[in-house]
Structure formats: C-alpha cells, structure tokens
C-alpha cells in the first residue's frame, strides 16, 4: 500500500470519495511508513496510530453515508505547537514536561470537523524559535533531501522542520505548521514542498502555543499548491476566541490555483537582491520572472526601502513578545518543575532547566528590550520600523498585484553549519517582512540547485489576497514542472 | 456649608500639612471576568471559578468582556470624566504564583476614562461643621485582578486560589487633592456611593471588592499652594504608598500613623524613602513592603493578543441615557424639592435605598418632619442596632402613617415617639397602636379646662407666684400633660393655662 502515501492530498481525497480505497487503508499505509521511517527521520515526536485508525473508521462511515467533509479521511500531521486534546503537546520544550491539553486548538478542531485524520505530532524548534529545528528537545529531524553524493544529514529548516520532513518523505498527506518569521516558508523551500502563511488574522491562534502573538500565523505545508489551498481553506475562518482573528469569509482558494496570471502585475523588489546570495538563487529568481512573463504577467520593478531594517526589528519585536508570552511557564500549574528551597530558586531552576539555550537567549533579549530605559530605543523604534515596512508594501502594491522573491538566501544546510545565532537569523531575511506587515506569503518549489537540493520562490500578496498568491504559485508550479522527489535513503 | 479647614500637624520644628492622592480599586459588577467567561461569584470553593484562560494554559487568549467595558464607561460618566473612545490594554510583567500569565493585563498610557471631578462631603465627628471639597480624578482604567496566595495553611507551602484571577477591576486614580485623614475616608465613601448608585461595583469593602491605596506625603504650610500653582511636585514631600486598605477606619488610622512617622523622620534630619507600605491594623502601624530599589521593572508593552479598544458615541450615549440619578444630583433635588438643608439631603441620599425610603415617607407630607423621622429616629435606631434598612421593623408606609397621625393632631410628637417605639417592638400599624392604647390626643377644650382648674385649685401658691415669674408656667404645663397621660394637645393646654392664670 506504500503507493497510497505518495498521492497528493487532492488525489487522495478523490480516491477516498470514489471509494477506490478507504480512509482506514490509507491511514494504515501512513502508519506503516511512519513506523518504518520515523526512527531515522525523527519527524514525529508523538505518534497516534490508534487515534488515527479510530478517526479513519469514523471517516469511512461518514463517506459511506454520504456525509463526507472537505478533508474526509485524509491523514495529516500536526505541528507540536498546536494543542491537541488528550495528546501530549510540548512545543518540543522540556518545560512543558508531559503536558496533555484538555482542549483542542481551533485550527485542528476545524480540520477534524472537516474529516481529517491525525497521525501524530510533528517535530519543531523549541517554541518555534529556530530556523533549523535544532532546538527541539527531541533532537532534530533529518531532511529527506541530501546533497548529491553526500551522506551528510541536512536540516529541513525550521521551525516547522517536522512538518516539512513528514510531507516531503510521504509520512502524511499534509501538515499543519506555523510561521512567525518564515517557519512555514523556509522549511518548505528546503524540502521541495509548498508552504503558505496566510494574512495575519486569517487563522485563529486559539490553542496554538504562543511565540510572538503579533507575528504568529498558522498555515499548512503540503505537496502541491492545490493541496496547500485545500488545507488552508479548512484551517482559516473567524474565531471569537481570538480577538485578532479577522471576521472575513474564507474564499474558495482551490479554484484559484489554475486560473493563471494573464494580465497580472508582478513586482520585483530590488532590495531583496542581497550581497553574497548564491548565483543559483539569483538565476532561479530570474527564471521565475521569465516564467510569469511567458504566462502573460507584466513585471514591474518596485522598491521596499526599509527592508534592511526588517530583520533587526523582527529580532526585537519577536523576543519581546516571547519574553512575556513564555512567562506562564513557571512550573506552578503544569509542565516540568525543578523545586528549589524558595520561590525564586524554583523559578530559576525550572526555567533554566526547562528552556533550551536559544529560547533563553531570546527571552533575555526580549526582557532587555522591554526594560525601562531601553523600551524607547528598542521596542518602540522597532514598532516604528514595522509601520514603515508596512507602508513600503502598501506603496509597492499600488503598482503591482503581488511580489516575487526567493524564499531563502540558501538551500538546506547541514547541522552545525550555522553555529553563530546571527548567521542563523539571516536565513529569515526574505520571510520576516511578510510577518512584520501581516501579509500572506507562499513558498513554491521551483528548481534543484547544482547539488540537487530544492529551492523555493516566494510570492507575497496584499492583505487578504491569498487568492493572488495561489494563482501566481500555481502558475510557477506549472511552469517549473517541479516533480523531483528525494531519493529514498532512510 | 462651612469653609474647608486646613489640617495641620504640630511638629517639634513647626507645623506640617498632609497631601494625598488615592488609587481605589473597585471590582466591576459583572457576571464574568474581564477576559474569560469564568464566573465572578464570591465564596465559591477555591479554584472553581477558573477558566483555561485564567489559569494561563498554553495557547489561551483573552477576549474582552463588553459588559466590563460598559461598566467602566458608566463609572466614568458618573465621575463626570472624559470617556476615551480609544484605549488600549498593556501587559504589566512580573512573576508571582498567583499571577498565572506572568503578567497582568492593565491599561498603562491609554486608559478608558480620563480626567473628571467629584465633590466630596466631609462630616467631622466632635461637632465640627460639615464641609465639601473637590477632588480631581486623573483617570480610570480597567485591569485584571490577581489570584490569592494563602500563606498560613501550611508551614512550608503557599496555596494559591485563582478564583479572583482575571476578575475585572476599575482603578480610579485621584490627583493629590486630599488633605486630611478624614478627607481621605470621605473621598472613598463618596466614590463608593457613586459606584453603588451606578451599579458598577457592589462596594463591599469587607470582601475586598473596594479597596484603596493611599499616597501620603507631608509638607510645610504654603508648599501645597505652590505645587498647585506650578504643578511642580518638588514642592511636595517624598510620598509613601500605603497599599490595599479595605475599611474607612483603617484608612484614617494608617494615614495618621504614616504622617507622624514621616514627620518624625524629617524632624530627626532624615529623609523619607519612596516605598510601598502595608498597614497592620492589629498594631496600628504601617511597615515597609518594598522600596524603590527593589521595585519591579514591569516592562509594560501593548498586549499583542488584544486589539485597541475603540468605542463610539452611540455606545457612550446609550449608557449615558440609562444612568440612574447620582447621589449629588439626588441631593440637589432633595434640597430643592423638599427644602432640606444640604446636610440633611446629604445624609438621606448617601444610599439609594435610604433615599427611596425617604421619598416614600415624604410623599404628600411635610418633608422636614419626614426627614427628621427618617434620619433621626429610624436611621438612628438602625445605626445603633447595626441593622440594614432591609431589616427595618418599620416600613416606609407605616412611618408615613405615623407622621400623618402627628400632622392631623391625632397624637402629639411626644406620643409619636412612644408609638414609634411600639412599632419597633413589632406592634404593627401606628393607627392600631394609638387605638389599642388609647393614645389619642385630647383636643376637647372642656376636658382640658377641667384638668387645668383642678391643678390650679390644688396649687394656689404656685398659681400666685407664676404671675410674677411667667416662665414658671412650664411647671403647670407639665402637670396638666401628666394628668392627661400625655394626651392633651400641648397648644390647647398652653392657651387655657394662660387664660386661667391671667398671664
């Protein structure tokens, strides 16, 4: 049954609907694959085969009685950041111990309501802080892709490294992920998958462990643009339990994927042409421009003058919010606790043992930038930069319908290659701007580099205009004809 | 109303004056907490009124309770304050086990209510004259309460009850306009009467639903006036904040102690350290809680989980239209409509229920007589017995009936007091009491004349001497009243006596 796991989500849903196979059959196929591969790939940190088979059986009943939902019977994986009722949720941090929520996140609840089947919880950087998945308490996953002729394990990117790995290695039909500074798009780019971060407020944050509230957005990683549209439709929608959730109807994005780009204006921001960007990425970007031109789009040069301030601003705003959001992990009510002989020692023991280095680094930065005497110079200034970045986009979108950029300045790298945290942060350079401005961004695989690693292109759309992102991404996907799969070595 | 007196404290080196600003925390009267659907019911078992949001479980988000916003706006209107159509919630970050989120959601620099002003009535004890003074309100903001840490249940552990965690509070901040311990407690009393009248806080201080922090400093005569002219705080002394007082008596005692403490330090050549202090009611002292050096850096920043709070004119106008009559407006109306003194009107309107009771009694009756009976006799009795108006053995209708009996001369005012005492004892309707005990006033001049004749005849010497000393007629009045069992109409008695004694 391994062939079933190679299906796209769209094809699998079609097969399920036609009763070519049952949800139980395809679910079992994924369970077998996970059983065989996960020890090597380390994509799943919690496997829920029994729950999956129960959900699959219920799906089969609904399919039989004609009550199938939009994702009926489709097995998916869930990033460990999403609270799942009765299933351990730790955001891959030691501090959450064996925390098992009594509640379900809105996004996953919507997926289960649509009929999706849960295979388990996916690996990620601790509290979604990282670009390589190295900060996970469960150790990093292995990117299914390797450099040609090399046995070196590469990162699938982060923070949604487990989601990208699972989708790329056919360990689920699609996965939930989350994106605070590029955590959906960068792993998608590193693994030859599609990842979209919708407009801030499209998907509810209720029940998703918070990293940086004003930047966090849920989204899927999937095998194709169409699959990502199917997933995203089920994940979005207004939620009264999240005050920042937008009261907007969810468009039928799946229909937009093959609508083409004829007559569209695509902006090319010159500031994304950074120093020492690999030639291949430069070339791929140029290729992307050609593909869109060929399909009838008009290319316009635009400027986003404050781009260079985006990364510094991001690394002030995100840690600041995180330092406050993560204050609740104090060992008092749930999660791991290290008892000290007084309250302060208990706090210190719990938090210094419970949080990893990268999380502690960001909590310290965040605490610092919010401190009295530094607030104006850092946090307040970063918020001003944020407004300027948003204005840059508004101005640019006066001239075009969407922007085309590379997703990342590099292909997947090996573990340990970016030991300097700042080098790691630079990997987010093209993705953080969409978070700071709250805009939708999608990464679509477009080519392999000389070493045989996938590279992605990013489309950034206007607020609430995911439709255009999907149209452009669909056009690029078609033009690129990207069908490469990692050669199975695991 | 008399002039506002200056409160001075005598020191070794001269006179001192007090300057105070207050921060009053009033729990918003609402069914649910500020950002979660959990109940606010008092007295539930520990940790039973706690939602996932209140316990700060991972991934939980706050959602504003519109009812609490409405209550804050209602209170702002009651304080004659500016309502800010744009306000914002900020996080105040600090670690404590009864603060599950690790931050309190409050409003730092964009409060929902801005500047206002209220008039505070002061009723000094010891017979000094009553007066009123204005207090400027700086702001009112909404914030979450914390949970409760219980340190005395176990020798080594602290227990935490999160029932209060996330309950909505209004913090009402005054400008430094309060100048004596009595003014401070009077200000809190006034605020309490306003929020209770508005229905925005139950004012129950014993349960901690209304509590005050007082910023106390001392200065030399003249300094405060310089401060008011220039707005320059350097004219005032260093302040200490006395936290969390929940009785009028404690507020006064704490301020009196704290003022003396500061004066002693200053006169001894020392410096007052800016700090937070707690009042210990058992010892009658304030003691240091934390000083400026170990004050928290709260790292305030806008809560990214919440959008700015924006309200429109329609929202405010709807609340304005549904405002009840406030204590000050009611007092003014009582002065005007019932011809009462400001003081009497103030006593009767301090509490909405009492005011309503009075209005029933005064309806179509002599208002001053009604005011006397309600505030002197009934409220006097209730206060002595420590009873609530709801527990009064005498209803407004019954008290009104008693006043009618006096007004139509069925009984005298003096007999009225006896009847009132019997009403309190539960004998019921005043008309029936008068019938049953034969207390009707004797207005039959013939019957009175007979008694007067009898008394004059029995006391010829006094009847002679009263002609020299007309003031001694009082003795005859007393004798006649006594002989009639108090039922003789006093005016008739006076008239007949004068005539018969030839005065």
Image (cartoon, coloured by chain):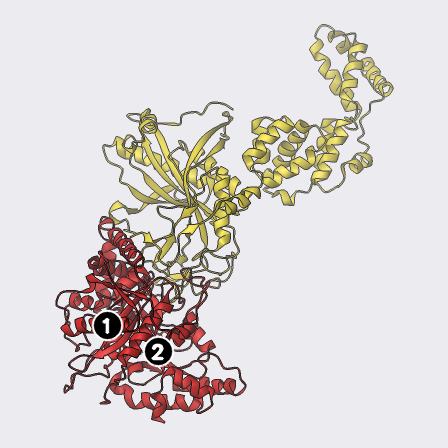
Front: mark 2 or 1: 1
**Extreme-top residue of the structure:** B468
Q: Chain of mark 2?
A: A
Q: Where does label 2 land, which residue?
A: A175
Q: Where does label 1 land, which residue?
A: A290
- Is B417 on the left-hand or right-hand side of B66? right
Q: Quadrant of the C terminus of chain B?
A: top right
- Is B268 on the left-hand or right-hand side of A69? left
Pick the residue in front: B202 or A314. A314
| Chain B color in figure | yellow
- Is A457 on the left-hand or right-hand side of A175? left
Pick the residue in front: A199 or A166. A199
- Is A183 on the left-hand or right-hand side of B486? left
The quarter holding residue B409 reads top right
> Does the image show residue A284?
yes
Task: Say what secondary structure mark 1 lies in.
Answer: helix
| Precedes in sequence: disc 2 or disc 1 | 2
> Does the image show residue A100?
no
Where residue B40 appears, as percent x and y from the top left, is 50, 57
**Tag on residue A281?**
none
Pick the residue in front: B160 or A380. A380
Q: Are marks 2 and 1 in contact (CB under 8 Å)?
A: no
Total residue callouts: 2
The quarter holding residue A225 reads bottom left
Q: Is residue A442 above or below residue B245?
A: below
Where residue B203 appears, as percent x and y from the top left, is 51, 45
Chain identity for the colour red used in the image: A
Q: Is residue A132 above or below residue B272?
A: below
Task: Say what secondary structure mark 2 lies in.
Answer: strand
Pick the residue in front: B360 or A344. B360
Identified at 36% across, 33% down, the residue is B19
């Amino acid at each position: 049954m391994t062939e079933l796991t190679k299906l796209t989500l769209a094809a699998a849903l079609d097969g399920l609907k036609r009763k070519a196979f049952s949800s139980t059959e395809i679910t079992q196929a994924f369970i077998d694959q996970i059983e065989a591969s996960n020890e090597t790939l380390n994509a799943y940190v919690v496997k829920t085969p029994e729950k999956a088979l129960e959900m699959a059986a219920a799906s089969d009943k609904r399919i039989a009685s004609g009550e199938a939902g939009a994702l009926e019977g489709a097995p998916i994986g869930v990033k460990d950041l999403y609270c799942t009722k009765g299933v351990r949720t730790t955001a891959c941090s030691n501090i959450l111990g064996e925390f098992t929520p009594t509640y379900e996140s809105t996004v996953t609840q919507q997926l289960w309501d649509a009929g999706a089947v849960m295979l388990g919880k996916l690996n990620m950087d601790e509290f979604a802080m990282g670009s390589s998945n190295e900060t996970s308490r469960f150790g990093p996953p292995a990117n299914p892709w390797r450099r040609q002729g090399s046995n070196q394990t590469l990162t699938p990117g982060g923070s949604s490294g487990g989601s990208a790995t699972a989708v790329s290695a056919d360990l689920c039909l699609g996965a939930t992920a989350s994106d605070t500074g590029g955590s959906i798009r960068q792993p998608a780019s590193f693994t030859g998958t599609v990842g979209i971060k919708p407009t801030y407020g499209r998907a509810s944050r209720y029940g998703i462990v918070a990293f940086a509230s004003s930047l966090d957005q849920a989204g899927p990683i999937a095998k194709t643009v169409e699959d990502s549209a199917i997933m995203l439709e089920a994940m979005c929608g207004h939620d009264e339990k999240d005050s920042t959730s937008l009261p907007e109807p969810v468009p039928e994005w799946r229909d937009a994927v093959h609508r083409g780009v004829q007559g569209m204006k695509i902006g090319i921001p010159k500031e994304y042409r950074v120093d020492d960007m690999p030639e291949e990425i430069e070339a791929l970007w140029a290729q992307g421009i050609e593909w869109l031109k060929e399909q009838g789009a008009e290319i316009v040069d635009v400027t986003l003058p404050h781009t260079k301030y985006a990364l510094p601003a991001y690394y002030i705003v995100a840690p600041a919010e995180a330092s406050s959001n993560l204050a609740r992990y104090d060992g008092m009510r749930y999660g791991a606790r290290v008892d000290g002989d007084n309250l302060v020692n208990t706090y210190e023991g719990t938090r210094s043992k419970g949080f990893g280095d990268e999380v502690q680094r960001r909590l310290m930065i965040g605490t610092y930038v919010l401190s009295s005497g530094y607030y104006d110079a850092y946090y307040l200034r970063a918020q001003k930069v944020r407004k300027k970045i948003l204005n840059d986009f508004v101005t640019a979108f006066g001239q075009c319908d969407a922007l085309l950029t590379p997703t990342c300045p590099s292909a997947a790298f090996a573990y340990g290659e970016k030991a300097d945290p700042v080098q790691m942060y630079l990997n987010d350079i093209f993705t953080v701007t969409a978070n700071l401005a709250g805009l939708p961004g999608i990464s679509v695989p477009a080519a392999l580099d000389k070493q045989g690693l996938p590279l992605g292109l990013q489309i950034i759309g206007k607020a609430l205009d995911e439709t255009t992102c999907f149209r452009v991404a669909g056009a690029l996907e078609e033009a690129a004809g990207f069908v490469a799969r990692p050669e199975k070595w695991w | 109303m008399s002039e506002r007196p200056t409160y001075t404290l005598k020191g070794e080196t001269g006179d001192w004056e007090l300057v105070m600003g207050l921060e009053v925390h009033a729990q918003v009267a609402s069914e649910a907490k500020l950002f979660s659907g959990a109940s606010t019911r008092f007295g539930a078992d520990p940790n039973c009124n706690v939602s996932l949001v209140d316990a700060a479980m991972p991934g939980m988000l706050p959602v504003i309770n519109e009812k609490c916003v409405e209550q804050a706006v209602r209170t702002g209107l009651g304080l004659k304050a500016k309502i800010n159509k744009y306000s914002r919630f900020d996080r105040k970050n600090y670690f404590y086990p009864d603060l599950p989120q690790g931050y309190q959601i409050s409003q730092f620099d964009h409060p929902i209510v801005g500047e206002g002003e209220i008039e505070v009535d002061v009723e000094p004890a010891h017979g000094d004259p009553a007066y009123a003074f204005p207090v400027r309100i700086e702001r009112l903001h909404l914030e979450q309460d914390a949970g409760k840490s219980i340190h005395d249940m176990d020798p080594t552990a602290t227990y935490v009850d999160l029932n209060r965690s996330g309950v909505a509070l209004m913090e009402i901040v005054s400008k430094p306009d309060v100048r004596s311990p009595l003014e401070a407690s009077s200000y809190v009393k006034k605020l309490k009467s306003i929020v209770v009248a508005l229905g925005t806080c139950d004012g129950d201080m014993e349960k901690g639903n209304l509590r005050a922090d007082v910023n106390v400093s001392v200065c030399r005569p003249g300094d405060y006036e310089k401060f008011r002219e220039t707005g320059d705080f350097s004219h005032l002394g260093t302040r200490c904040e006395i936290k969390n007082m929940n009785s009028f008596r404690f507020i006064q005692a704490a301020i009196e102690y704290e003022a003396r403490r500061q004066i002693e330090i200053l006169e001894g050549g020392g410096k007052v350290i800016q700090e937070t202090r707690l009042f210990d009611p058992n010892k009658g002292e304030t003691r240091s809680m934390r000083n400026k050096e170990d004050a928290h850096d709260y790292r305030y920043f806008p809560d990214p989980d919440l959008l700015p709070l924006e309200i429109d004119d329609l929202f405010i106008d709807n609340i304005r239209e549904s405002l009840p009559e406030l204590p000050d407006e009611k007092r003014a109306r009582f002065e005007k409509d019932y011809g009462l003194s400001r003081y009497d009107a103030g006593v009767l309107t301090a509490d909405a229920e009492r005011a309503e009771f009075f209005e029933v009694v005064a309806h179509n009756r002599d208002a001053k007589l009604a005011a006397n009976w309600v505030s002197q006799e009934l409220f006097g009795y209730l206060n002595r017995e420590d009873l609530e108006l709801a527990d009064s053995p005498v209803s407004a209708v019954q008290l009104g009936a008693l006043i009618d009996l006096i007004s139509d001369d069925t009984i005298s005012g003096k007999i009225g007091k006896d009847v009132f005492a019997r009403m309190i004892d539960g004998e019921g309707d005043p008309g029936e009491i008068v019938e049953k005990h034969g207390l009707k006033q004797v207005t039959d001049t013939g019957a009175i004349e007979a008694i007067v004749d009898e008394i004059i005849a029995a006391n010829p010497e006094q009847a002679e001497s009263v002609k020299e000393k007309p003031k001694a007629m009082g003795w005859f009045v007393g004798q006649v009243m006594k002989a009639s069992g108090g039922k003789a109409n006093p005016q008739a008695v006076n008239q007949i006596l004068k005539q018969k004694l030839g005065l």
